[in-house]
Amino acid sequence: MADRYRGTMHAGMNCSLASRIYQHWTGDSSDFGCRYGLVRLVWAEHAPAITGRIAHEKRVKRWRREWKFALIERGNPEWRDFHGQLARRSGTPDQARGDGWGRSAPGHPLPI
C-alpha cells in the first residue's frame, strides 16, 4: 500500500487482500496506515503457503526504499492503484470477500 507515487509505503501479509484494502479505505487499518493515508494498492503478490508469505514480507520490510521502488516499478511504473481492477473481479470493496484477489504469480503485480 502507498499514499502516492514514491511516497510512504507499507508492506504486509494477509489472507484476504480485499478485506485488507477495505480496512485501509475505511481507516480501520494500522495506526501507521491511517496516519499516512495508505489507500493505494500498488503491488501485490501471491504465495501458496503462509510460511512463504510471512518470510517474503519480513524480507521486503528489510529492503532499502530504492529496492522496493524497483520492485513496484518493474510491473507498475506509474504506481497505478490496482484496487479498481481487482474490484471488478471480486465486487465492490464493501463486499470484501477476498475471493481471487492476490492470485498472481510470485513476483508479478496484479493483475498479471
Image (spheres, helix red, strand yellow):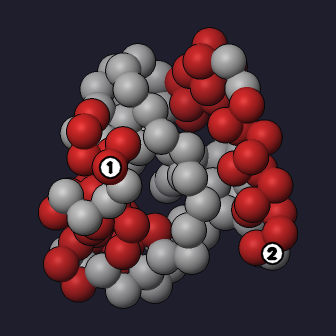
Question: Which residue is drawn at the image coordinates 36% and 55% (left, top)?
Answer: 30
On the image, the x and y values in percent for residue 74 come to 61, 26
Q: Residues within 10 Å of mark 1 (few under 14, many from 20)?
A: few
In the image, which disc is placed on residue 63? Answer: none
Residue kind at label 1, given as amino acid type: Asp
* Whether residue 83 can be seen here: no
Q: In the displayed structure, would residue 27 be above or below residue 3?
A: below
Residue 49 circle label? 2
Q: In the figure, 65 relative to 34: above or below?
A: above
37 on left or right of 77: left
Distance Cα–Cα, label 2 vs label 1: 27 Å
Q: Which residue is mark 1?
A: 31
Q: In the figure, residue 53 lies in which quadrant?
A: bottom right
Looking at the rendered structure, the secondary structure element under dot 2 is loop
In screen coordinates, is 104 left or right of 101? right
Which residue does the image show at 83% across and 69% down from the upper left? 51
Q: Residues within 10 Å of mark 2 (few under 14, many from 20)?
A: few
Helix, strand or loop under label 1: helix
Where does the image place residue 64, in percent across and percent down from the top left?
A: 68, 18
Q: Residue at x 36, y 21 (%)?
A: 7
Q: Amino acid at mark 2?
A: Ala
**Where, quadrant-wise, is the N terminus in this rendering?**
top left
Q: Which residue is located at x 47 percent, y 40 percent?
A: 10
Of residues 24 and 111, the one nearer the viewer is 24
Instruction: Please determine whether, in this image, residue 99 is positioned above or below residue 77.
Output: below
Q: Is residue 28 left or right of residue 75?
A: left
For discs 2 and 1, the disc positioned in front in the rendered view: 1
Residue 70: horizontal and vertical position, in percent?
Answer: 63, 20
